[in-house]
Amino acid sequence: MALDAMAYRNFKQEMIGFIWKELDPYEHEIERTGEIPRDDLFPKLRRMRCFGLTVPEAYGGVGLSVSQYVPILAELSKIHGGIRVIVHVHNMTAKAVAALGSEEQKRALLPKVATGEWSVAFGLTEPDAGTGRDLKTRAVRDGDHFVVNGRKHLITNSEFASHFMVFGYTDPSRGARGISALMVDRGTPGFTIADMPETMGCRGGQHGYLTFKDCRVPVTNVLGTEGEGLLQMTAALETSRLFIAATSLGTAERALELSLEFAKKRSTFGKPIAERQAVQAYLADMATDIYALRTMVTDAAHKADRGERIPAEASMCKLFGLEAVGRVTDRALLVHGGVGYTRKYPIERLYRDARLNWVEEGTPTIQRLVIAREFIEGYRWTSDRDLG
Ligand SMILES: Cc1cc2nc3c(=O)[nH]c(=O)nc-3n(C[C@H](O)[C@H](O)[C@H](O)COP(=O)(O)OP(=O)(O)OC[C@H]3O[C@@H](n4cnc5c(N)ncnc54)[C@H](O)[C@@H]3O)c2cc1C
């Protein structure tokens, strides 16, 4: 799945123009109010087909490949984390539906998801359990329905999503092979949604509590194979860790651009601070982190586009990305001095936005567990071949 090179070049150019001309101006309003003006913003996102970026063309989407989606996500991350979160979670969940849904499910859901008329949210994390085999949500078969009971929290886009992909045990006796993914329509009796407190960064993004109390969901709403939902989803969504790394990349690139601009303008003791070796060292370290991250993300994206599995690479990109953007935004604050801590410059927002990358798609601990497991089980560097 990919746009041909010429079509992509045109689409990307148009998209980048759109991001800076039409989305960037929302930054101040969102930071001031803590809210995304959806009535105003969403028609624009729809016009630029932002809700269909990862949806295959056959279902009305843009059909971007992994390496085509990455630069667009990185660019969105530069202008505002809250807008990035909305677009990313919608597209990531749509990608999962495209990967796991039956033909009937895809035909029913994806065309309206691609236009943004509908939106799909991802419901895995729970307030009373760890993510994975520890899940407490249960879906018990009763005729041609499952009866779902449980709680989820931190579920992005819950304020407006029309459908929720919800993970719970359909057969607790089978461990990880007993967890299924169910599509639950908003408004299903027994399913309620509540707001959570606002977040440190990526403001305006909205993340809710979901509660299921004897909520009846048709068995035809199981995505993928019953009992294999979590395992299939983990495989289908390897690239979403890469997408968080792309977010780190975009945020870090913007922090460097702003720091270079600032360092050339700000003078102390008669010289721009860009001429001080200590400041140059910050800038050099930032650029080096960005180059390393960009190279890793590009390599992993191309592997994914070639159809290779990338569990280790995706986790390495996500882990390195969050540490790199952490270092880069720390240094960007130092380059800006005291004003960097104020809202005069976007550096303090980039700093806060970047911190979501620590937890989104799993903590650093989880990434290290995945990477170590892959290597212990005999991971081989496919890129050895590229090095000759
Ligand atoms: C803004 C935002 C949006 C989000 N959107 C979504 C969404 O749309 N859908 C969704 O499903 N989730 C979403 N999440 C949840 C996110 O994926 C989780 O917060 C993240 O994966 C960490 O899980 P947790 O919060 O349960 O942390 P916990 O599991 O409670 O972890 C707390 C700490 O304990 C450590 N820890 C936990 N278990 C172990 C262990 N077994 N061994 C060693 N260390 C351990 C962790 O590494 C971490 O340091 C979102 C979170 C945020 C902040």
Image (cartoon, helix red, strand yellow):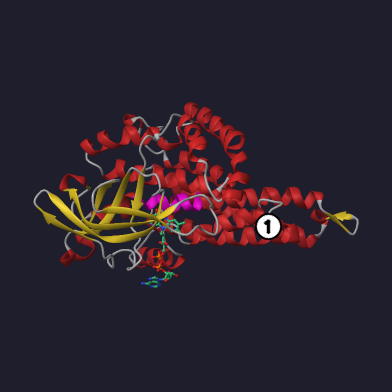
Left or right position of 163 against 266: left
Left or right position of 200 against 180: right
Task: Establish if 133 lies above or below 147.
Answer: below
Outermost residue to the left: 143
Please give the range of residues in magenta.
Answer: 237-246
Q: Is residue 64 visible?
A: no
121 or 302: which is nearer to us?
121
User: Would you say residue 44 sits in the magenta stretch?
Assistant: no
**Residue at (39%, 67%) from the top-left corner?**
369
Indicate the position of residue 69 as horizontal and vertical percent values: 46, 40
Indicate the position of residue 166 as horizontal and vertical percent values: 28, 53
Task: Establish if 201 lies above or below 366.
Answer: above
Picture mark count? 1
Q: Amino acid at mark 1?
A: Ala
Residue on which the image places disc 1: 332
Outermost residue to the right: 270
Main SS type for the magenta part?
A: helix
